[in-house]
Amino acid sequence: MSETRLDVAMVHSLAPQARILVAASPVDETQGESGMPEMMRVLDHLTRHRLADVVSMSFGSVEQNFANPASIPAYGAALDRARAAGTTLVASSGDLGASGPLGDHPDRHYPRRVVAWPASDPRVTAVGGSLLHVDPRGHRSSRDTLWPKSGAGHSSRFARPAWQRPATAGDAVPGRSVPDIVMQGSSGTSQSAPLFAGVLALAAQVHHGPLGDINPVLYRLGAAGLAAGIVDVTQGSNTYAEVPGFTAGPGFDTASGWGTVDVPRFVRALARAVT
């Protein structure tokens, strides 16, 4: 329930006029294939009945936790159906930095770089975590930095999509890069994803309708920088235990994607750019 309360509070904090629907599964999400079928059935229900313009998923499992290589494509069919319905999908990038939970053992992690699905799926906008720095009166004291445990890396299951290639031209590591964007994540990326979902709800209101798959548009806006409300995050690393992470720097980077957003400016730019 604490996870649900956090999601609802984050969406409501940025989009108070949005209609928030909590979709619950009778099976807990666990690492791997135990709970993911139920999660995708819930997504299909939302899609079939056109219940949501934006779906925020504060869950994920390391790609290597799926023992059957066919599992991710099978579950991904639900993402295709959601995208066909015009639903925008966002997911948390993970909370163990460059690593991730090893199977169903929350106290163990992979000794190498991994990323989690569904955030690693190109049909989903992956949201990592940043830290907001303010003084006691609520004024910014410095620029946002990367949340140290924010999930980031490269997919071993998905090739780099065409809309991501220009931003990652200097990246020698293949695979879809995660995350695409970061939001406040002092409580984990389960805080970041619903915050960005709230931003997208505002953009859908301005657009007067669903936004659909925003990733190609997001990457065009990212290249425009501040003019489109994209605020670069240039400091921080997501090294976790003995697993070396990625470091944020100027422009697009693996650690923080494009960075974070200036909400009013980004909402207007996104609503205009979506067709």
Image (cartoon, helix red, strand yellow):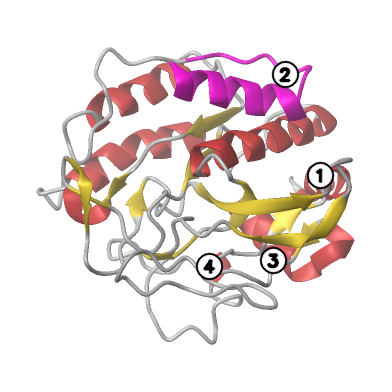
Q: Which residue is mark 1?
A: 263
For the residues marked 3 and 2, what is the alpha-carbon distance in whole angstroms? 28 Å
The percent position of residue 117, horizontal first and vertical second, equals 34, 48
Q: Which mark is residue 255?
A: 4
Which residue, as the protein is rendered here, is positioned at the far left? Answer: 67
Residue 56 lies in magenta, yes or no?
no
- Real-space Cα separation, disc 3 to disc 4, in angstroms: 9 Å
Q: Position of residue 7 (x, y in %)?
A: 55, 26
Mark identifier at residue 232: none
Marks 1 and 4, the one that precedes in the sequence: 4
Residue that badge 3 annotates: 233
Secondary structure of the residue carrying numbered label 4: loop
Q: Position of residue 140 (x, y in %)?
A: 85, 52
Q: Is residue 3 within the magenta segment?
A: yes
Type of amino acid under label 1: Val
Q: CA distance from mark 1 to mark 4?
A: 21 Å
At 51% from the left edge and 44% from the top edge, which residue is drawn? 189
Q: Secondary structure at mark 2?
A: loop
The first of marks 3 and 2 along the sequence is: 2
Q: Is residue 160 above or below residue 60?
A: below
Determine crowd level at label 3: few under 14, some 14-19, many 20+ residues with C-alpha closer than 10 A: many
Displayed quadrant of residue 31:
top left
Look at discs 1 and 4 and give the one toward the viewer: 4
Closer to the chain start, of discs 2 and 4, is 2
